[in-house]
Amino acid sequence: MLSAFLKKKKKDLFLYAMRLHDDQLEDISARFQAEMKKGLSAESNAAAAVKMLPTHVRSTPDGSERGQFLALDLGGSKFKVLQVKVREGMGIRKGGVEMEEKIYPIPKELLIGRGTELFDHVSESLKDFLQEKNINLEKTHPLAFTFSFPCEQPTLNQGLLLSWSKNFRLRGLQGKDVVQSLKGAIERTGGMNVDVLSMVNDTVATMMTCGFDDQRCEVGLIIGTGTNACYMEALRHVDLVEGDEGQMCVNTEWGGFGDDGALNEYITEFDRDVDAASNNPGKQIFEKMVSGMYLGELVRLVVLKMAKVGLLFDGFVSDALRTKGKITTANVAAMEEYKTGLKNTRDILTGLGLTPSQDDCIAVQHVSTIVSFRSSNLVAACLSAILTRIKKNRSLRTLTITVGVDGTVYKTHPQYPKRLHKVVRRLLPESHVRFVLSDSGSSKGAALVAAVAQRLASRRKQVDETLFPFQMSQEQLHLVKSRMRADLEAGLKNKNPSTIKMLPSFVYHTPDGTERGKYLALDLGGTNFRALLVNFKKGLHQNTRLYHKIYTVPMEIMQGTGEELFDHLAQCVSDFLDYMGMKNAHLPAGFTFSFPCEQTAIDTGTLLTWTKGFKATDCEGHDVVNMLREAIKRRNEFDLDIAAVVNDTVGTMMSCAYEDPECEVGLIAGTGTNVCYMEDVRNIEKRDADAQRMCINTEWGGLGDDGSLNDIITPYDAEVDQNSLHPGKQRFEKLTSGMYLGEIVRQVLLDLTRGGLLFRGHVTEALKTPGIFETKYLSQIESDRLALLQVRSILQQLGLDSNCDDSIIVKEVCGAVSRRAAQLVGAGIAAVVDKIRENRGLEHLNITVGVDGALYKLHPHFSRVLHDTAKVLAPLCNVSFLPSEEGSGKGAALITAVMETKN
Ligand code: 0WK
Ligand code: 0WK
Ligand code: BGC
Ligand code: BGC
């Protein structure tokens, strides 16, 4: 007989391979970190053993979840049907959750039958639950589905089953959407209305359940029949999901760790035997070393081998000991009970038809300890890998986090939790890891996910409803085109006033390249004033020399007296002439004045009405050229010969026509919006001239001032118009130009925030401040290159504290408002070029539109949407758009040059 000591030695040897030392655990942790990376990255995910499945759960509970939900909890040791009331309903403790549940056993044969049969059983159980709990069968009940198997989820309520695991091995569902299968079964059962809002893995549901009471809970861990973990990963690392802002919960499916051989040196012969005898050999290697479905079997195989080699029961082996599953994980737990462990071991072995000696019992108890110790050690190693990754993601020195746990092994095995906690803390000494047991199963968490899904879905719906009026249908755009056309026609007629004034510009030709000489150009645009010196030299165009200086026009000047405004302009001109050293040059000047002026000649222009941000007094009805001349005279230090005053659209057309002779339309999409084009004189009733064509400044900004656009004007537009300097005027401009788009966005954001859909419903002072949302922010926010992070920092600058969902919605609102603006301008252009085509009786027209304005030039999408819309609405015109390089000032100089050569 072997000496007891030797025997003991040999026994220990047996289990030597199962004793894992910290350096081995650190090695396993490192390997698992590598596996996680592989699973997260798009190019290596397909071959990764650890699948790292995105769950579309983007946040842990934030206290706003509420609602009543049905819940199904399928895949663990017990299939449960539940009703979960979150913070709602009678007698609920403030902020509490009330649950009613019923466990429905699943007949064994169903676990290896057809998938549809299992879901029929699930659905019938659901119906039984509704009837038993007298839950109204008519009402549609939102349902949260916990399904504890690896599923690829394109969205929160879709789950393509990748493979079965544990003791489930059904046919016909792999690769299928299990939510559809559930819906199909519920339909087949009939008599109940259920809306499956979300499907989550049990780890995710467990994390959410524990996150309900502990905001720090960002990891979900199951050590039950199977084992698995999930955690909140930075979205930028989840390649399979678009977006890089915020977080998303990833279901690691760590049960598959080792399926690619990564754990081979830790696999013992017993593990191989368990795997070989399992219903999914080669799969879930890590799970088979750790989880409740296999621990008992591992112990049995070890004890069996030790008995066979005579180290136990004097070599006697009973049939029961040879029989698979005869030692359960519950037995293992019982054997490790503090006080009763040894007795339990004797009873269990006796139950297996063995007559164990005291040593045998101690040895077998020891085997159980080693096997379950290894399990908790392996879980600790992989858990510390996850926690280390989270720490790195957030570049934290120390991590304080909570892990939500569930599962029979963790819940019922006496030593397991303590051992696990101890090893995790030993592997991560500087972190503070709290473990919270999920006291009521995972369905509370599943319901919380459904509540979030419900809130997101309702928010989505409300945002879509809010933004729907901004979506222009082709019909609506065609209507706008025909209304624009009608008012262009009406504006040319003498009879009745038209919303579109169609102002003659007295410019009859576009440049022909013969222009020569030095000219001054003054350019009062929407946002600033520019003074330019343009020198047209012999030879090619690019020989034009141009110097300019930009001057701001302060608000108080824009809205002061006319005298102050023109004195300001004269002072800027004086500064420019000093700057150019030409105080005494007495040059001919062209004056671009981007406001509606009635002209009776090229060098006079009576301001009809201010627009945009201007409201200077004593100007409307006055000749702006005289007012400038007066101001220059008042300065009495230089003299100017203002030879022409043109609208900025006309200046832009001329400027671009200098480059491209086909340019016969000038478009401004800036602070304001407007277009001019070469109209046939025969169509201009109010002005006869002996030229074939004349450029008409349409002032199309006024379209709709007679209510013709009321069917597309939204309440937000009406609000912006009411708060504007010139209510009721320039309605088309107020739907399309830079001065107003930011305000429209602000009104929509205000409304969404008041509706609790944004910024958590906090209407900040910032959001109530007119003009705070400058149009430049739209351009920045909508740029594709800009991650949501930067959107948030823009919102931050505006004093709007936002989360990632908020920034997504803000970006959408900006997009809806700017897209509509570009489409409407596109419809306007289509009306203009089609008129020109018909004026000239052409089947097909090639034409170029010269464009200027910050909105067109700086907005990331405006110009493309404008081009596409014009193309669709004027298919018989081939319209090219030519952004003006030097602004309309050059155009004014060109016109002046034309005038000079004529005189
Ligand atoms: C209870 C949870 C369930 C999960 C189970 C896992 O409610 O979602 O699947 O824990 O533990 P098991 O029942 O497999 O031991
Ligand atoms: C630059 C032109 C100017 C015009 C302006 C419009 O030179 O005449 O008024 O573009 O763009 P905004 O400055 O309004 O964006
Ligand atoms: C499944 C996981 C599940 C785990 C715990 C594993 O077999 O693949 O999806 O989370 O068991 O139930
Ligand atoms: C003015 C037009 C100008 C346009 C673009 C509008 O507000 O009425 O004259 O062309 O803005 O600057």
Image: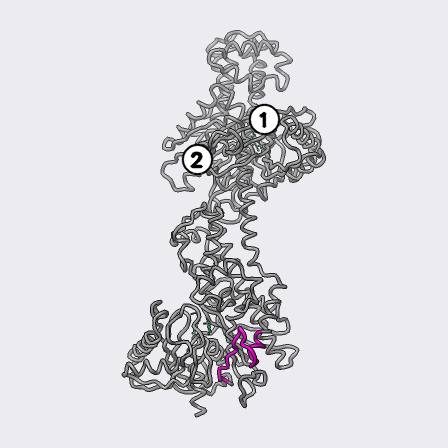
Ligand 1 picture quarter: top right
Q: Is residue 490 within the magenta segment?
A: yes
**878 versus 178 height, above or below:** below
Q: Position of residue 361 (x, y in %)?
A: 52, 10
Mark 2 lies on a secondary structure that is: loop
Q: Residue 101, labelled with which disc?
A: 1
Q: Is residue 882 within the magenta segment?
A: no
Q: Position of residue 380 (x, y in %)?
A: 46, 29
Q: Amino acid at mark 1?
A: Glu
Query: Magenta part of the protein: which range?
Result: 487-507
Q: Which residue corresponds to mark 2?
A: 215
Q: Main secondary structure of the magenta part?
A: loop
**889 versus 169 height, above or below:** below
Within the image, what quadrant is residue 217 found in?
top left
Residue sitting at the far front: 496
Within-10-Å neighbours for mark 2: few <14, some 14–19, many 20+: some
Question: Which mark is nearer the camera, 2 or 1?
Answer: 1
Along the polypeptide, which appears first: circle 2 or circle 1?
1
Q: Relative to residue 632, is residue 821 drawn left or right? A: right
Q: Residue at x 53, y 44 (%)?
A: 456
**814 versus 320 height, above or below:** below
